[in-house]
Amino acid sequence: MPTSYDSLGAGQIARLVRDGEVSAREVAQAALDAVSARDGDVHAFLQVTPELALAAADRVDAARAAGEQLAPLAGVPVAFKDNMHLVGTRTTCGSRMLEGYESVFTATCVQRMLDAGCLPLGKLNMDEFAFGSSTESSYFGKTCNPHDLGRVPGGSSGGSAAAVAAGMLPLTLGSDTGGSIRQPASFCGVVGLKPTYGMVSRYGVVAFGSSLDQVGPFGRTVDDVALAMNALAGRDPRDCTSQRWDVDFCEHLHDGVEGMRIGIVDAMNHAQGVDPEVESAIDAAAQALCAAGAQVVDVELPHAPEAISAYYVLAPCEAFSNLARFDGVRYGYRYEGARDLSEMTSMSRAIGFGPEVKRRIMLGAYLLSSGVYDKYYYPAQQVRALITQDYRDAFERCDAILMPASPRTAFAFGEMSNPTQMYLSDMFTISINIAGNAGVTVPVGVGADSGLPVGAQLVGPAFADDRLLRVAATLQDAYGAAPVARAFSGKGGELR
Ligand code: GLN
């Protein structure tokens, strides 16, 4: 939005629209202008949808003119990771396989944001099929970190984090299977919540690892994330894992942490591979929570170091099965020169999928083959049970656990050329998907060496996400809301 608007949060925009200080159309236009001016540099968007945004804005303005009560997020621009279906848009998952694929239905999470009055601005870039931590693997080109255009925004929801960080709009949705909301939020200096598994419907979100995937919001403040959760959370008959939820995320958000116990896992926070600037930022965040009245207690998660190994068995197995549908027959890229069905399917997949997707599919196929299955898949499930129990035990002793969201700040493009090195960047996030509980990234300033945003991660027990956000809000009060990043030239560029 033009500079006067771009630092406004969702709550502030909704209030201005409700009070008639500004029309929803003006807000939509301002956000579209901000995307035009900035996304040439950042490339967060895969598709911009002015017609959808302006039509939604006109509906809000007409409702207001008719004296109707406006929905809580009426007039707030939003955009969606490109693995979420929305009729009237393409849903590509950042893959050649789905290039030009038009959504034929709308995901529940998307619909709920629209029902809450949001204005859909478009679809956001991501690692191909959400496999990755840098958004470099998108078939449609990389997204740049708005704090430093030579660095990655994180991933796989890199477009969702970057668009918010660059002040193009106040809210976006992403998905998180092993860290894809929390790690890019950390790299881009914004707030990102992975809710408890079952809090938000997965219906209409292209599946990666069905037992791990969860949708969540990005915002520049915890308050905006809480507002989005009020729209998103709850039972959806179309996702049998989704749960009923009637709690208002905003009601006790600013009640503070007096008397709460914050768990610290010393062995994890100071583990090998964690940058000193991240270690000291997290230590300072612990002190800030103490100063606000919380008590810090030591807890242990003895099996958490095995989470990455377990994840890279379980997630590829689930992905192998979920991606079997992209066969060139029903939808997706089709190789036209084949002599028979088998050649058509294999060539379609060989050309339609990029290297990381193929690596995961082959890994999943191998791990699920007879003889191999017993050696890896079962033990990985056993590790999953142990990690889940670790968290249960830890939450007997504390209300939330504080740890880094990522062992380091945003890395440069191409710096992580070895896939296993990239996999390690999720060392703090993956165990939370494995256990199913909630995690939120909150910006806690910039690293002393890199000058780039550092994110603290707060982990909470299952279905206590509202209380977790309360701790996050306290941390935000100590550090202030995330500033809009301004490394882009603002000269504009080509939009898609
Ligand atoms: N980086 C992790 C992976 O590549 C997590 C991705 C995600 O959460 N979607 O699997």
Image (spheres, rainbow, N blue to C red):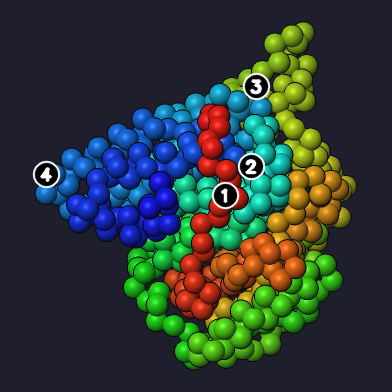
Q: Secondary structure at mark 4?
A: loop
What residue sits right under mark 4 in the picture?
Answer: 66
Which numbered mark, 1 or 3, is in the foreground of this view?
1
Whether label 4 touches label 1, CB < 8 Å: no
- Percent position (x, y) of residue 235? 41, 56
Whether label 2 touches label 1, CB < 8 Å: yes
Kind of residue at disc 1: Ala
Left or right, residue 253 beside residue 334: left
- Residue name at image x 78 percent, y 69 percent: 275
Q: Secondary structure at mark 2?
A: loop
- Residue name at image x 61 percent, y 86 percent: 287
Which class describes the residues within 10 Å of circle 3: few (<14), some (14-19), or many (20+)?
A: many
Q: Quadrant of residue 381?
A: bottom right
Kind of residue at disc 4: Ala
N-terminal of the pair, mark 2 or mark 4, is 4
Whether label 2 touches label 4, CB < 8 Å: no
Tell me, for residue 143, which label it has, or none. 2
What residue sits right under mark 3 in the picture?
Answer: 333
- Location of residue 347 with respect to 52 vertically, above or below: above
| Residue 42 in view of the camera | yes
- Percent position (x, y) of residue 466? 44, 71
Considering depth in this image, is 12 or 435 the residue closer to the camera?
12
CB of mark 3 near ligand 1 (< 8 Å):
no
Q: Secondary structure at mark 3?
A: loop
- Location of residue 484 with respect to 437 vertically, above or below: above
N-terminal of the pair, mark 4 or mark 1, is 4
What residue sits right under mark 1 in the picture?
Answer: 162
N-terminal of the pair, mark 1 or mark 3, is 1
Question: How much space separates mark 2 and mark 3, taking CA atoms?
Answer: 23 Å
